[in-house]
């Protein structure tokens, strides 16, 4: 059934077009924002002229504790066009927390929010299709890459491997979707209910289970600047994603232990037979091999358990996910 957009976010006209907020996480994006903001403003203009979105629609830049002039760029853009709004986080809280901070700031001020990266890798032209799908009753619209040609071979291969591992471990995410997505007010309200410190919004969205659909787009190369994800940051986000949603790695370790125990029985029999046969000394190589194998398995096991204990530690502290230092709303 088609959704009736009430324009409740602004309370102006009960038959108004939806107020759409574009939420952009920005970390050291001083060179990218002057390219990105005008493009997104013209998308808002086009949507408002076409009657797809309200003229009150706006952009919210979340400065994620940048060390360059990102905040000054946002201030300058805000002075030029009041539809450009911003919040500045006091420290670099990471893209997930920046997105969450942005979504919580636009909560109650818009009918739908679209999260989009600052580097124009996500196609701004797909925003209108997302809003159109929202108008047809979908609560969540995922932006899905139709190809990964613009990514490096390494990024493409590691991303595909990561999706496979996620699936294997029981984590339900949308294939080839990152953070380019539309969420309506209901989805944002539900996201607010997820109290975990270790956020993985990409995993939470399918978990919420509202009506969702996809919009396909070609992923472009970065408009300017460098990626903000180093290899270590990428691995850290991936490990966080999996361990925030699945306890299966711990279970796998337990099963591996069980299998090793069975192997141990065979080893005990073999050692006894060798001993009784007077060949005890000729076991050096196998002992060395099993020593190394077991030691590494033990370390991995301890590491995985430690990862979960670390997560529990962070959750029980209940620290705020981010701090807003300044706001231009
Ligand atoms: N970003 C952020 N905080 C961070 C790292 C990245 O807000 O700690 C933002 C960044 O400014 C960009 C988006 O997240 O708008 C995606 O980052 P990037 O384009 O560097 O990632 P990639 O596309 O290379 O995976
Ligand atoms: Mg990017």
Image (cartoon, helix red, strand yellow):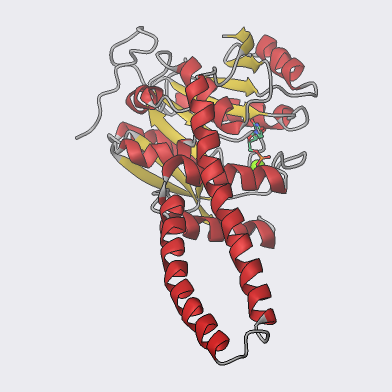
The image shows residue 183 at horizontal and vertical percentages of 40, 31
Question: Foreground: 256 or 323?
Answer: 256
Q: Residue furthest right?
A: 68
Question: Foreground: 326 or 291?
Answer: 291
Q: Is residue 267 left or right of residue 258?
A: right
Q: Is residue 118 left or right of residue 29?
A: left
Tag count: 0
Question: Which picture quadrant has residue 210?
Answer: top left
Seen at 55% across and 61% down, the residue is 161
Question: Foreground: 158 or 148?
Answer: 158
Residue 157, visible in the rendered structure: no
Question: Foreground: 120 or 317?
Answer: 317
Q: Is residue 305 left or right of residue 247?
A: right
Q: Residue furthest bottom?
A: 277
Task: Answer above or below: position of 132 versus 51.
Answer: below
Question: Which picture quadrant has residue 135?
Answer: top left
Q: Residue furthest left?
A: 1
The image shows residue 86 at horizontal and vertical percentages of 62, 15
The image shows residue 97 at horizontal and vertical percentages of 56, 27
The image shows residue 63 at horizontal and vertical percentages of 66, 22
Seen at 38% across and 53% down, the residue is 170
Task: Answer above or below: position of 290 versus 49.
Answer: below
Quadrant for the C terminus, please: top right
User: Quadrant for ligand 1?
Assistant: top right
Question: Which picture quadrant has residue 299?
Answer: bottom right
Residue 252, visible in the rendered structure: yes
Quadrant for the N terminus, please: top left
């Amino acid at each position: 059934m088609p959704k009736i957009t009430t324009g409740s976010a602004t309370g102006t006209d009960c038959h108004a077009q939806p107020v759409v907020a574009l939420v952009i996480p920005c970390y050291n994006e001083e060179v990218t924002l002057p390219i990105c903001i005008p493009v997104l403003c013209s998308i808002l203009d086009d949507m408002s002229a076409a009657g797809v979105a309200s003229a009150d629609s706006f952009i919210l830049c979340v400065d994620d504790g940048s060390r360059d002039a990102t905040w000054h760029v946002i201030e300058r853009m805000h002075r030029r066009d009041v539809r450009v709004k911003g919040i500045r986080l006091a420290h670099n809280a990471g893209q997930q927390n920046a997105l969450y901070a942005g979504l919580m700031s636009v909560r109650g001020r818009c009918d739908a929010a679209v999260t989009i990266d600052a580097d124009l890798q996500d196609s701004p032209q797909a925003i209108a299709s997302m809003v159109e799908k929202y108008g047809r009753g979908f609560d969540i619209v995922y932006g899905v890459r139709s190809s990964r040609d613009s990514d490096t071979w390494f990024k493409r291969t590691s991303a595909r491997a990561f999706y496979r591992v996620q699936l294997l471990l029981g984590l339900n995410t949308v294939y080839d979707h990152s953070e380019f997505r539309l969420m309506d007010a209901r989805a944002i309200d539900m996201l607010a209910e997820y109290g975990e410190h270790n956020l993985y919004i990409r995993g939470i969205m399918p978990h919420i289970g509202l009506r969702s659909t996809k919009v396909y787009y070609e992923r472009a190369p970065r408009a300017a600047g460098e990626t903000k994800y180093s290899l270590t940051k990428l691995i850290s986000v991936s490990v966080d994603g999996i361990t925030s949603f699945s306890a299966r790695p711990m279970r796998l370790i337990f099963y591996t232990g069980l299998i090793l125990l069975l192997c141990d029985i065979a080893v005990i029999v073999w050692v006894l037979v060798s001993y009784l046969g007077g060949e005890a000394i000729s076991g050096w190589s196998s002992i060395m091999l099993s020593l190394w194998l077991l030691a590494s398995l033990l370390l991995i096991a301890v590491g995985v358990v430690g990862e979960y204990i670390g997560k529990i530690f962070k959750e029980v502290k209940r620290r705020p996910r981010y701090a807003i230092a300044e706001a231009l709303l």
